[in-house]
Every structure is written in structure tokens, then in C-alpha cells.
Amino acid sequence: MKPVHLASHALVASVGMLAADASTSKHVVLVHGIWDTSRTMRKMAHEMRAAGLKPHIVTLTPNDGRASLEVLASEMNRQILRAVPHTASFSIVGFSMGGLVARSYLLQFGDPHRVSAFVCIASPNRGTWTAWLDGSPGIREMRPGSKFLAKLDKDAARFSRTRWVTIRTPLDLMVVPANTAALPWAHNISLPVLAHPLLVSDPRVIAAAIESVGGDLSRMSAAERRALRRAERLQRQIEDTPPHRKASPAKQ
């Protein structure tokens, strides 16, 4: 489904999408989600190395929502300072809660001139109803309408040079409703992955993430390239479907 660009983010939509070009940095920071560890991102990191990129996996501790996402963003900043050369630009790929931690990193520490691309995979950018099931500080921040999420949105225009991409599945039972993962100023991709945890290992998602951060697709395996072509065809079908035919979850 094509996003509706909000007037307040027109600059981000028009400029940010042009920022991803051949000059995109090879450094990519990967951020796992809630209850996950760095192991969750290892397959994606492996495929990114095969595509000529230099992935760095951030480990979030604690990973269960006990800590505010703003605190986890501080830990992310410390790990980036150790892993990425201070003069280098880099891209960020955040999965689920990790995408919100990464957005908080942008708000608190991010340099708009260094972040080439920002990819959220099934991150509750506009909140998720499931966050009402737990009162932990970090999970409360993921509730729809939270002050935390409002602060992130207000900061987005500062990163107009960054390419923004979201990837989600309409079958998500963690981010509810699933379309809250989309951002009005981003390129939003919907793929019918069967479950939320499978997104980071799905070949189509990995291929789309690699393309979004400027990886060399010619160095990917034939299977990964086929997965990317399937994802691109599916995305075109979703975008070309008239609104009155979008009743199926796979077409939302």
C-alpha cells in the first residue's frame, strides 16, 4: 500500500528517498528486537557481508522491556562509537523494538550527515496494541500515542538526507495492527511473511534490506537475487491494486 505523505514531512519524503545512491556507506548497524539477542541478526549479517557490506550487530541489554528505549539507545551509541570509524557514514537496520531504539539513537546522538539509510523491519512506529499487555517502561513507550513515539516523529525531518524504508508483514501478531509499522515519509514494503519472528530470516526481507542500504546485489547468491525479484514483483502488485480490492490481508 502506498503511504500518504503528510505535509509536515514532505521534505523527508522528497529528499530522503533520493539519498540512497552509489555513495551509500558499506557500514551497517543491525539492532535486534525485544527478547532477542545478537544471534537473531546473524543470518542477515552473513548475507550482508556476502553483498560487500560491513555489518555490526548491536546487543541490547536488558532485552525484555525493563529499560527505557532511550536508555538502550545510549548503549547503542556506545557500541557504534566502538565499531564504526568516527568519520564514516553508515546505515541502520532495526528489527521490531530495535527499530525504535535506533530511532531514539537518531534523536539523541544521530548525525544527519552520517546516516545513509534507515530500515525498520516490523517496528511499531505508530505503536502496537500488544504493548498494553505489559507495564514495563520500554514496552509502555511502544503504546500508540505515547510521548516517546511523538518525540521520534518530530525529529524525523532532521534526517531528510537519509533514505527511510520500512518492511512489514500483514500477518504480524506482535505489531498490531500491522500497518502501524509504516511511516508516512518512508518507502513502505509489505511482504506476506508468516510470523513476526521470521521476518529477519526471510530471504525476501534480507534481500530488500540489502538493496535498501546499498549492498552489491550481484555478489548475492542466486537464491537471494530470486527472492529479491519476487519481493519487488509482490510490492508492485500491492501498490497497483485498487483500494476496493484490498480486502485480503496479503494486499494491505
Image (cartoon, rainbow, N blue to C red):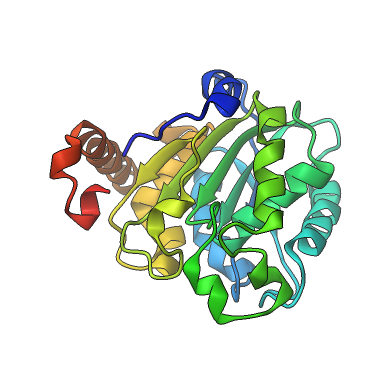
At 76% from the left and 26% from the top, the residue drawn is 113
Quadrant of the image occupied by residue 213: top right
> Which residue is at a point 17% across and 52% down the rendered structure image?
247
92 or 203, which lies in front? 92
Going 46% across and 59% down the picture, which residue do you hit? 200
Is residue 199 toward the left or the right of residue 9 in the image? left
Q: Is residue 140 above or below residue 93?
A: below
Q: Position of residue 73 (x, y in %)?
A: 77, 56
**Drawn side of residue 152 relative to residue 18, left or right:** right
Asked which quadrant contains residue 112, the reply is: top right
Counting every numbered tag in the picture gives 0
Q: Quadrant of the N terminus?
A: top left
Q: Nearer the viewer, residue 92 or 190?
A: 190
Q: Quick check: 201 above or below 152?
A: below
Q: Position of residue 48 (x, y in %)?
A: 53, 46
Give the side of residue 234 with respect to residue 103, left or right.
Answer: left
- Could you say which is closer to the camera, residue 44 or residue 245? 245
| Residue 32 visible in this rendered orientation of the protein | no
Residue 43 shows up from this direction: yes
